Amino acid sequence: MDLPFFSVITPSWNQGKFLRGCIESVRAQGDSDFEHLIFDNCSTDDTANVAADFPHVRFFCEKDHGQSDAVNKGLRAARGEIICWLNSDDEYEAGAFAALRRGFENPDIQVVFGDVRQVGYDGAGDALARGCFETRLDLVRWWSGRVKLHQPAVFFRRSVLEKTGTLREDLHYAMDYEFWWRMSEAFPFEYLPQVLAVQHRQPGSKTILAWQKVLEEREKIFSPFYGLVDCGSRPELMKQKRVALSKIFLDQAYAVAGARPSQGLQLMLRSLAVRPMGFFGFQWAGVLKRAMF
């Protein structure tokens, strides 16, 4: 049997309203040399009915132990040369597969990443999120924002899997970052300056609902490696972390204060707890104004 060039892996759970767009974005690439594997955690919505409309999809409905477990099932079942992980509420941009074929023409290139178009649900419209990854040690400084690896726009050869292994199943929010950390130890990442995927920043997504857990899990993953980047000055490194986290919480507070005042104030207090000296500034006043009026 001829093996497919692309293996698209989609973990799924109660995202039927987005799944059709996900599947159609893969099929619309105009490249027939692919397989699409969906591992569904026994969804109770119309996921199974949506998948049934697409006979080419390999649909597995079985209990799993979380997203990492579902993706790992796909990684073990994938037969393609290029492995893709596409969540059920994300899509591929038109022309992505054609660009990836060009990107992987050089057999020495093992990992490719690109840009994404982020669809907002807060009225702000779409936004371009560019990819950026220069050195793996920037992953250790996870609070700095130096790494811009967008999960649906990262692609790798199956030979990478053979060396790196699969996702850590004890991680549920930042397993992609830990996966890239191990991957980047042995393989350079090649940037393809093109929009390859579409991320729906929808309110029900795990990243939106539990973004603070994402931060906590990154801390769990990378804190053992702080010694690689502190250059003998751990207090300065921790100061940089506090300043960055304070701003992250404050930015989130400003974003939600208008619609959810109590949550905005809670985030503002969390920013203050991380860095008490950061209280003064126009953004604090802006959060209070949005929360009160």
Image (tube, rainbow, N blue to C red):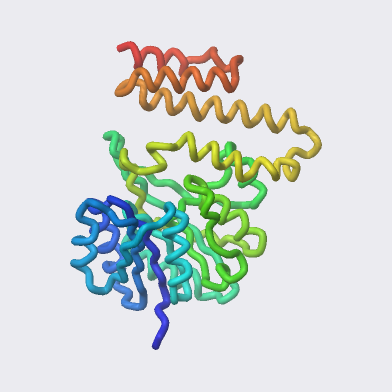
Q: Is residue 49 left or right of residue 84?
A: left
Q: Quadrant of residue 208?
A: top left
Looking at the image, is 25 positioned above or below residue 120? below
Looking at the image, is 190 positioned above or below residue 142? below
The residue depicted at 54 percent of the width and 18 percent of the height is: 272
In this rendering, the count of numbered labels is 0
The answer to whether any part of residue 193 appears in the image is no
Residue 287, position as x, y percentages in the image: 41, 17
Q: Is residue 81 left or right of residue 198?
A: right
Depth check: give the residue in front, 168 or 239: 168
The residue depicted at 32 percent of the width and 21 percent of the height is: 258
Farthest right residue?
232
Residue 21, position as x, y percentages in the image: 25, 57
Q: Quadrant of residue 205?
A: top left
Residue 267, position as x, y percentages in the image: 45, 23
Q: Quadrant of the N terminus?
A: bottom left
The residue depicted at 28 percent of the width and 38 percent of the height is: 121
Looking at the image, is 77 positioned above or below residue 120? below
Q: Quadrant of the C terminus?
A: top left
Farthest bottom residue?
1
The residue depicted at 67 percent of the width and 48 percent of the height is: 137
The answer to whether any part of residue 165 appears in the image is yes
Farthest front residue?
63
Residue 120, position as x, y percentages in the image: 31, 40
Depth check: give the residue in front, 42 or 84: 42
